[in-house]
Image (cartoon, coloured by chain):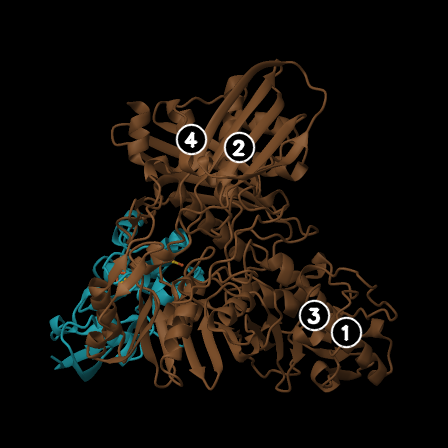
Chain colours: A cyan, B brown
Amino acid sequence: MAEIVQITVNGATHRLSLEPDVPLLYLLRNDLGLNGPKFGCGLGQCGACTVLLGAEAVRSCVAPVGAIGDLPVTTLEGIGTAQNPHPLQRAFIAEQAAQCGYCINGMIMQAKALLDHKRDPSDADIRAALADNLCRCGTHHRIIRAVRRAAREMQS
Amino acid sequence: MTVGLTRRRFGQGLGAVVLAFSLRPGLAVAEGEHLPGSLDKNRALDGWIRIDRDGGVTVFAGKVELGQGILTALRQIAAEELDIDLERLRIVSGDTTQTPNEGFTSGSQSIEQSGAALRLAAAEARAILLDLAAARLGASAERLTVADGVISTPEGGRTSYWELVGPDTFRRDATARAAPKPADAHKLVGKSLQRIDIPAKVTGGAIYVQDMRLPGMLFGRVVRPPSYGARLLGIDEAAFRRMPGVVAIARDGSFLGVVAAREEQAIAVRNAMRDAARWQNGPALPDAARIHDHLKSLPARSEVISEKQGPVAAAVQGLSASYTRPYLAHASIGPSCALARSDGGRLDLWTHTQGVFPLRRDLAAALAMPEDRIAVHHVQGSGCYGQNGADDVALDAALLARAVPGRAVKVQWMRDDEFAWEPFGPAMGMSVSADLAADGGIVDWRYEVWSNTHSTRPGRPGGVALLAAWHLDRPLAPPPPEIIPRPSGGGDRNAIPLYDLPQQRVTHHFIPEMPLRVSALRTLGAFANVFAIESFMDELAAAAGADPVEFRIRHLRDGRARDVINAAAAKAGWKPGRHGDGTHGQGLGFARYKNHASYVAIIADVAVDRASGVIRLEKVVAAVDSGQIINPDGLANQIEGGIIQAASWTLKEQVGFDRKGITSRDWDSYPILRFTEVPEIAVELLDRPNEPPLGVGEAAGGPVAAAIANAVAQATGKRLRDLPLVPARVKAAFA
Ligand code: FES
Ligand code: FES
């Protein structure tokens, strides 16, 4: 049965009438019109749908809206915009870290969670943090460089 | 799609100042003369370029952005020849209502075809405008200069493209007679300009077809049969019509789909119908463990595609070996997606197809509509690397849209739809034997390759190439498979060695029957043929007691080929005569893609863990000659991506199937290379500013596979000839 779900996304609170088992991804994409989180597998395997729940990177394709509770959701749109990009977004542009770019939402959000608790990660830390985020275009090295660049920029 | 913002900076003169060359009059195109690139089949000059009233310029390309950066490169080329600032230039690509028909965006040919056409069209447009300016300003065209579309005389006379152009200025056939700029005059071409699509991609801009939202849009999903050839016996459609959000259930024969108000509702109904539907199974698939023997046992059309005979030194030893590659999936990260709206006998379709015109042809046939009632618009999707589900989901969306006239329907495949139903890159077998003379030279080479076709794309007569059409009540069969003509070839792509051999015989066995659905996957047959040829070159070098680098150079006359091999060897610190220590090894692989495109040499460093069977790919060095470089950073991005994808194919990938169907259905059953596994990569670009630019997206594939296998052989003394080089195979080699 549909319930009233109250949810805070990118700083704004929304009340929606939804089945509680609807995956968060569809609320974000279709009710709120956000583009950042992508459908990749719907199975929690690829990372394309990653968002932040509180400070944690989660797979929105397997997170039911009824289980979100009071934790705020942050999407790619919530960390910065084309006009005012987050250091990670700036770094991905500077390193030209995308081919098709479909995976990049997940890469940036997963990296954001990493940098939020580890300011100066090694390459091995970055690789480990992104190990469950898949990229088919082979953009891995640019992504690692972009995360490193963002870490540098955020420290200075 | 249209990209590129126009900033109104008219008259600021920030563009390059370049001396003008005018069109020489009286040079018409002779009857039957071919023009370069895609200009040949799309001659209308105004089909390529339009000077806009708002101070911008629009160029039209039939090629589309697949994440390879093509739109950025094409803008560089056009702005360069037109002498305008990049900000003024918009590009419209892949739209049956607006752009030239350039067939498919495939085969790393966009720069060669679209780039060549746009370069010549832009040079010609500029020359026409200069002739008009010369008349208006009373100066000879040779004395004019152009800066950002503003044309000036030394005496201070000024006019601009926007003042000069009239509605019919470009209404003429292109002649390709205006000479493009020489390389040393380039200001934009050759620069690592940032890609125009990346800012939106990293900030959540609406850039993918998945991100399109039309008013009143509904969501569709399709229930696919459990296996190839299965038939839908029955389903209680009425029960599903009552599920939440359902707007329509569409059934036509074995095609079954749902349209719902919300996406998760469509998915829920799709899953429920999948579980409830009763199917009659299709024919059993062949035994996966013996698939290569099975393929070779099927009827084949065999053709000797290269034969050379000459005086040779006496052979002192002979060698032979056989190699295989499995079926490979495109495995796009984003499953295929399309949006359709059917309204009053007209269909609009938004798709990430690689070819809007060929897709329109097949849609028209499948839907029994005239082509001119269908508009196909390209919008970016996830990277495709060949023919994935993009074209098929377009027909799915069209069929579901017809069930809800006037409403737009967005359909995205589920993960298992994509894995189970995309056309795979075909499994292949290769056998090669050769004789060596006393001096270690190759005196005879015999090569055979067995393969299905490597393209079953839409746009061909004699049937419909789109999945749903085969499942309709009155099914439309796919057209018969065809041999892709040489020199590019399909299964025989790169089957003819680039080496100069005194005697050779290369045979292509084309197998029409396709046990699994197959089509184009990045490199087509080149990946397997280069893997086999370059593995065997190392086997021969070892038999001849020669160093692999020296052995190849000895058999190559082509200077550009020798240069990339030497450059890679130097960059990788290649040491002739090095032996493996049982764990670490270094290997070389080389090819000129399609034997007429980019040259790539790869050197791979591996570490082999005999106990676990895991091959760790530590480093890959690439040397690349792709002629003139349009955008060095974009090129490097493409090469890096090609290397990682080929490494993934080589080390991990094969489509699983059993008698009942495809068993690779998610990322656990079809693993690909992860961040923790990607090698360090170093790319050296050899710029050839005076050679034509060549595509590079696919060129590294085969050399990577061979370099890895050769490195493993050097490390361990074990030659692995069957891809992928998964731990179980590696362990078995040491057992
Ligand atoms: S789409 Fe959520 S993990 Fe793949
Ligand atoms: S850039 Fe295409 S999947 Fe990562």
User: Label 1 is placed on what type of residue?
Assistant: Thr
Q: Write down the quadrant of residue B219 in the picture.
A: bottom left
Q: Disc 1 is attached to a residue of which chain?
A: B
The residue labelled by disc 3 is B122
Relative placement, left or right, of B282 versus B697 is left
Residue A119 at x, y percent in the picture: 25, 58
Between B588 and B255, the residue placed more toward the observer is B255
Q: Nearer the viewer, mark 4 or mark 1?
A: 4
Q: Quarter containing ligand 1? A: bottom left
The CA span between labels 2 and 1 is 53 Å
Relative placement, left or right, of B45 versus B575 is right
Q: Is residue B604 visible?
A: no
Q: Residues within 10 Å of mark 2 (few under 14, many from 20)?
A: many
Q: Disc 4 is attached to a residue of which chain?
A: B
The residue labelled by disc 1 is B145
Q: How many numbered callouts?
A: 4
The CA span between labels 1 and 3 is 16 Å
Secondary structure under badge 1? strand
The CA span between labels 2 and 4 is 11 Å
Q: Looking at the image, which residue is at 68% across and 70% down?
A: B16
Image marks 2 and 1: residues in contact by CB distance under 8 Å:
no
Q: Earlier in the sequence, mark 4 or mark 1?
A: 1
